[in-house]
Amino acid sequence: MFTITHRDPASQARSGLLTTAHGQVATPVFMPVGTRGTVKALTPHELHDHGASIILGNTYHLYLQPGHELLARRGGLHRFMGWDGPILTDSGGFQVFSLIYGGIADEVKGRRPQHAQRLPDMVKVTEDAVIFKSYLDGSRHIFTPERSIQVQHGIGGDIILAFDELPPFRAGYDYTRESLARTHRWAERCLTTHRERDPGALPNPDQRLFGIVHGGVFPDLRQASAEHIGAMGFDGLCIGGSLGADKSQIYEVVAMTVPHMPDGLARHLLGIGDVDDLFEGVARGIDMFDCVSPTRLGRHGTALIRDPSRRWKLNVLNAPLREDDAPLQEGCRCYACQHFSRAYIHYLYRAKEILGLRLVSLHNVAFLLDLMAEVRAAVAAGSFADLYAAWMGKALTL
């Protein structure tokens, strides 16, 4: 399902084609996140028009509401939400384990959440399953590896992920090793369940299953997991788990993991999507990325711009934008930049008009999709190092 088309001579970057039941995806690719079956504030038509080729849906949220049984009866998530392109669904593990620590999205990257708190009554981990309470109504639910795969079968995504345990960054070596072994055992159970499915009873009979490589920040564990998961027969691999204390350590984790992953499988770095992270990930051989950041930033009044000195971000609420007739980003092809000024968007946010967050969310998604199109073209032309230097303001070094 994955073919490498070009390799960059100055780095580990590669471009390729990922073939799914709902079309091909050119890589490296950024996929907008549609957690609950919608990329927040945007329509499928807008996503298509601005270059999205694949989106991500969240198994945990879709399982709780509207439910995978309903989705299966309605022909799967594609038909239900009106999106005819490829969909990847995560396993639900990240969200389930986030009930252990408030703000685990920061915790797994080594940043202590401001209001972190243990919630031991919300989730219990056993060898067989994870028992958790719904954030909607407190009802009790059980996710086994088998259950996660069955739920994803009902949702009908083109790419589904194995169920894994997510230890927090500060778990330490011994627990990370123990958790890694459990994740490997769960991976085998996921494969067995997937192979025993009845394709004729599913809304998408041609689903592909990706495994997830863990190991925290420990090189020997990352190597062991990459080699173990890579030899199990998955259709692709993800890098997950605790990624490090800061961005530099995230890049180290990727660098210590990728060389031990099979070259012919697509590689997905889970939950990463800042501009610098995309460049650094591609340079180290990553093919797929996802992140909620472009629409989350849009909801909070931050637009992505081509300016590394501002970390590629512009606060549209800043007073000087009140009379700024320029678009959010000169040369941007998105609908917001083609039709509206910074001054108008600044006004929309000040007036609390919902159109403002829609326009900036759309711009941010389009910005990252266009960036990845530039990256693919540069890899194909053998000039990725030049593009890296132009965007990052420094030479590419690995």
Image: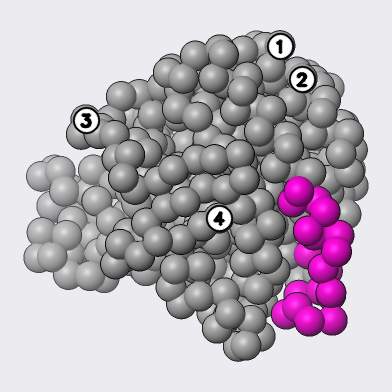
Task: Measuring from the top left, give residue 274's x and y in whole percent.
Answer: 47, 36
Q: Answer left or right for 206 relative to 258.
A: right
* Disc 4 and disc 2 in contact, CB within 8 angstroms: no
Is label 3 in a helix, a strand or a loop?
loop
Three-letter residue code for mark 4 = Phe
Three-letter residue code for mark 2 = Ala
Three-letter residue code for mark 3 = Gln
Q: Which residue is mark 3?
A: 114
Task: Tell me, yes or no, if residue 308 can be seen here.
Answer: no
For marks 3 and 4, the one nearer the N-term is: 3
Task: Measuring from the top left, give residue 24's x and y in whole percent.
Answer: 79, 62
Q: CA distance from mark 2 to mark 1?
A: 6 Å
Is label 1 in a helix, a strand or a loop?
helix
Task: Measuring from the top left, give residue 130's x and y in whole percent.
Answer: 52, 48
In the foreground, 334 or 109: 109
* Disc 2 and disc 1 in contact, CB within 8 angstroms: yes
